[in-house]
Amino acid sequence: MNRLSLTRQVVLGLLLGALLLPQAAFAQFGGVVHDPVQTNVHIANFAKTMEKWAREMNHWMEEIDKYNQMIEKGERQIQGLDNLLRSAEQIAAKDRELRQTMSVIGKTVRLGIV
């Protein structure tokens, strides 16, 4: 007969099981596996994140430039106020001189009339 004996079937089953068992153990191994597709997805996500950070950084650089321009404008206005105050002081000094001159003229006229 072509049928294998029970002993041979058990031995053959054990041998096949022993040969297939290490491969099954390796399939369940949790080691590092290089997956190019997943690596490309990860790189693409990282590039998007970097692009977002670059946009955010550009936004804040523009904000810094805006505030820097505001500070420079304020500085120019303060310098303009300084010049305006100097002009006002000069006008006040001339006004004081004019009043003193008018006072002297008034005293002279009063002394001459009396």
Image (cartoon, rainbow, N blue to C red):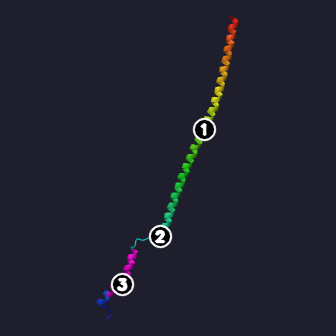
Residue 72: image location, x then y, percent: 60, 40
Q: Is residue 108 above or below residue 29?
A: above
Characterize the magenta stretch by its predominant secondary structure: helix
Q: Is residue 36 left or right of residue 6?
A: right
Whole-Å distance between the Cαs marked 2 and 1? 59 Å
Q: Give the residue displayed 38% in from the left and 76% down from the top.
A: 25
Q: Earlier in the sequence, mark 3 or mark 2?
A: 3
Which numbered dot is residue 35? 2
Q: Earlier in the sequence, mark 1 or mark 3?
A: 3
Q: Amino acid at mark 1?
A: Glu
- Labels 1, 3: front one: 1
Residue 86: image location, x then y, percent: 64, 29
Q: Amino acid at mark 3?
A: Leu
Which numbered dot is residue 75? 1
Give yes or no for residue 21 being in the magenta stretch.
Answer: yes
Q: Earlier in the sequence, mark 2 or mark 1?
A: 2
Q: Give the residue displayed 60% in from the left and 35% down from the top.
A: 78
* Residue at image mark 3: 16
Foreground: 105 or 59? Answer: 105
Q: Amino acid at mark 2?
A: Asp
Residue 3: image location, x then y, percent: 31, 91
Say which element carries label 2.
loop
Q: Is residue 38 left or right of residue 91?
A: left
- Outermost residue toward the right? 112
Residue 5: image location, x then y, percent: 30, 91
Looking at the rendering, in which quadrant would you find the C terminus? top right
Occupied quadrant, residue 26: bottom left
Whole-Å distance between the Cαs marked 3 and 2? 31 Å
What is the span of residues highlighted in magenta in the rendered image? 11-27
